[in-house]
Structures are given as structure tokens and as C-alpha cells.
Amino acid sequence: MSSNESVESSRTVTCEIKNLDDLHQLASRIVKHLPQSALVTLQGELGAGKTTFVKAIADSVEIDPAHVTSPTFNLITIHESPENTIRLVHADMYRVTDPDELIETGWDTALVVPSEYRCWAFVEWPQKIASALPAHRLSITLKVTGESSRQLTIKGTGTNYEQIPMLIMQSS
């Protein structure tokens, strides 16, 4: 995984989220367009709603959102759908100081799944491991705009991702 590969195209959209219902609707639209194997980075200040967003994604694919908590201390948590066809890897890199530490976290094995699975990795604080991430990905930045409102900027970069932002907006 390297961010040094050339990426020729990217698309960005911004959407306003007024409440949790809006967030759940957006999450449902996103899961319809993610490729079989996907990397989604989540950036935003503490309390911006990164883990809440992952909970909404989990709920959209029938993974109990009550089991989705911030993986700040264990760094990586794996959740599987009831029918074992979707693996949701939730990583929080806040405490990582060097991308080389990923080897110790189990990052590589968390992303290895049978071919019939869909595997989606959601990475909070991706800037901590930027040099280890692929250039092709969906990047979401969450900005607090009110007590329960957020502005999400969604950027799809490279193959399998560049069309996702526009598809999400079209399906709203």
C-alpha cells in the first residue's frame, strides 16, 4: 500500500447533515456504491462523528451498531455481517506515531478475507499513516457545524472511487 501511485482523477461533493437520520440515509447510499474491497478514510476533529458515521454504515448492512465503538485503544476492530458476507474493518490511528507500526496492529490480516466477502476498511485519523495508504480511496472529512449537524466532504480518488461522490448525490 503506497500513496505514491499516480492518480489521474478524483471527484468531490459536499453535503450537509442536519441530524442522525440524515447521516443514516447518507450511509445507506454510500454502501450501495462501495466496491467489493474498499478503503474509506475519515478525517475530522475529536467529536466530529467519525465513529458515529461507522455505526451508521454498520447499521446499513445489518451489523449491530451497538457493537461498533471507537477502536482508539485496540486500534482495529473487525465486525462481520450476520450472514458473514461483509467484513467491516474499523481502524483508529490516533495513537500511531509511525506507519511502520501497522505491522504490529494486524492491519494486513484484517483486510484478508475470502473472495466471496466484501471487505470495507474505515480508517479514522488516516493522516497518521498517510504514506502507507493507497491513493485510490474514498476520503470523507467531517466538520462540526452545529450540535447535531455536520458538513461532509466526500472525495473519490482513482479507479472504483471517482464516481462514488456523484452517485451518492444522484441517489439522494
Image: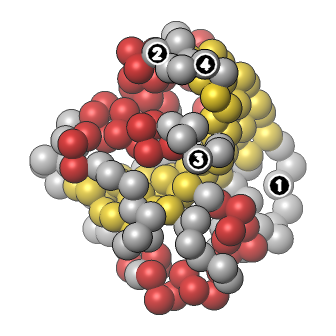
Of residues 146 and 18, which is closer to you in this image?
A: 146
Residue that mark 1 sits on: 7
Of the numbered discs in the image, which one, if any, rests on residue 146?
4
**Residue 15 relative to residue 55: left or right:** right
Q: Position of residue 60 (x, y in %)?
A: 31, 31
CA separation, marks 4 and 1?
Answer: 34 Å
Task: Estimate how packed mark 2 is, as few (under 14), some (14 to 19) or many (20 or more) residues with alpha carbons within 10 Å.
Answer: few
Q: Are marks 4 and 2 in contact (CB under 8 Å)?
A: no
- Tally the marks: 4
User: Mark 2 or mark 1, which is nearer the start of the sequence?
Assistant: 1
The image quarter containing residue 114 is bottom left
Q: Is residue 143 visible?
A: yes
CA separation, marks 1 and 3?
Answer: 29 Å
Q: Residue at x 37, y 33 (%)?
A: 56
User: Mark 2 or mark 4, which is nearer the start of the sequence?
Assistant: 2
Task: Estimate how packed mark 4 is, as few (under 14), some (14 to 19) or many (20 or more) residues with alpha carbons within 10 Å.
Answer: few
Residue that mark 3 sits on: 46
**Residue 128 relative to residue 172: left or right:** right
Of residues 1 and 139, which is closer to you in this image?
A: 139
User: Mark 3 or mark 2, which is nearer the start of the sequence?
Assistant: 2
Q: Nearer the viewer, mark 2 or mark 3?
A: 3
Local secondary structure at mark 1: loop
Residue that mark 2 sits on: 19
Q: Are marks 4 and 3 in contact (CB under 8 Å)?
A: no
